[in-house]
Image (cartoon, grey):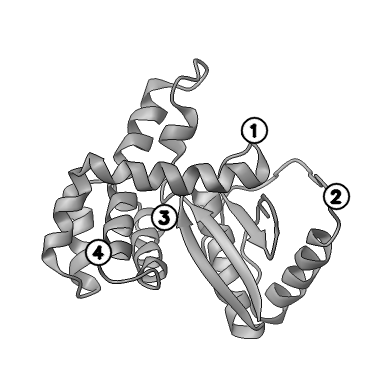
């Protein structure tokens, strides 16, 4: 079984696209995926070229991350997958805004304890977010964002996808990523994006 780690922030549509690819990979390859949180708010805090509007929205996105951390602590890490999928459906597919009401709906839909809603405003959980965030960045460097993916002992930013490949095509791309990850001298392969996130 291939060990895969994925770092996410619910704010990022590109991370969402990559995560949907990995969910397809789960169907066609023997993989064990661990879902980790990171924060675009803490990544961009203090960067003078980042707009106030972006940083404000990234701060609101801490709410879902806190819910994920609190749930992971109280129930277990496997629930992060379901939380991320449910939040992502609301945020990226239904274009809902970050709010207390959004988290309340997500928690209710998954049948999780209503007490988890208190974690949305619990700043003490940011310590855990930052710890996970820092571990992800330590594997790839400070000049990237999300998604971060680690295959066995090698991590990198991306892949950036739109739309997410499905079925065996998802598996073939994963095989290629695993192959690239075996080369420590391989750093970057990139071309200009010509489309935005295609969610359908």
Real-space CA distance between mark 2 and mark 4, rounded to the nearest whole angstrom: 39 Å
Between 25 and 70, the residue placed more toward the observer is: 70
Q: Is mark 2 on a helix, strand or loop?
A: loop
Q: Please tell me which of labels 1 and 3 falls first in the chain.
A: 3
**Comes first in the chain, label 4 or label 3:** 3
The residue that mark 2 highlights is 186
Residue at the spot of label 4 = 106
Depth check, mark 1 against mark 3: the one in front is 1
Q: Which residue is drawn at 65% across and 83% down?
A: 30
**Circle 1 sits on which residue?**
143
Residue carrying label 3:
92
CA separation in Å, label 1 and label 3: 25 Å
Labels 2, 4: front one: 2
Query: Is 46 drawn above or below residue 60 in the view shown?
Result: above
Q: How far apart are marks 2 and 3 (CA)?
A: 32 Å
Q: Where is residue 170 in the image (x, y as percent from the top left)?
A: 68, 73
- Report, in whole angstroms, how far the alpha carbon at label 4 lies from the one at label 3: 14 Å
């Amino acid at each position: 079984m291939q060990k895969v780690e994925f770092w996410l922030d619910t704010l990022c549509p590109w991370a969402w696209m990559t995560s949907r690819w990995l969910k397809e990979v789960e169907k066609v390859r023997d993989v064990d995926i661990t879902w980790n949180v990171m924060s675009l708010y803490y990544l961009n805090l203090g960067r003078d070229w980042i707009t106030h509007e972006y940083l404000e929205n990234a701060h609101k996105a801490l709410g879902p991350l806190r819910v994920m951390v609190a749930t992971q602590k109280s129930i277990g890490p496997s629930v992060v997958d379901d939380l991320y999928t449910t939040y992502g459906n609301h945020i990226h597919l239904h274009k809902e805004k970050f709010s207390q009401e959004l988290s309340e709906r997500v928690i209710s839909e998954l049948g999780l304890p209503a007490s988890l809603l208190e974690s949305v405003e619990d700043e003490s959980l940011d310590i855990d977010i930052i710890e996970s965030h820092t571990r992800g960045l330590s594997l790839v460097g400070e000049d990237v964002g999300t998604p971060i993916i680690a295959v066995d002992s090698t991590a990198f930013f991306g892949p950036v996808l739109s739309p997410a490949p499905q079925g065996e095509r998802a598996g073939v791309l994963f095989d290629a990523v695993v192959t690239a990850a075996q080369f420590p001298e391989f750093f970057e392969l990139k071309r200009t994006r010509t489309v935005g996130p295609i969610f359908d």
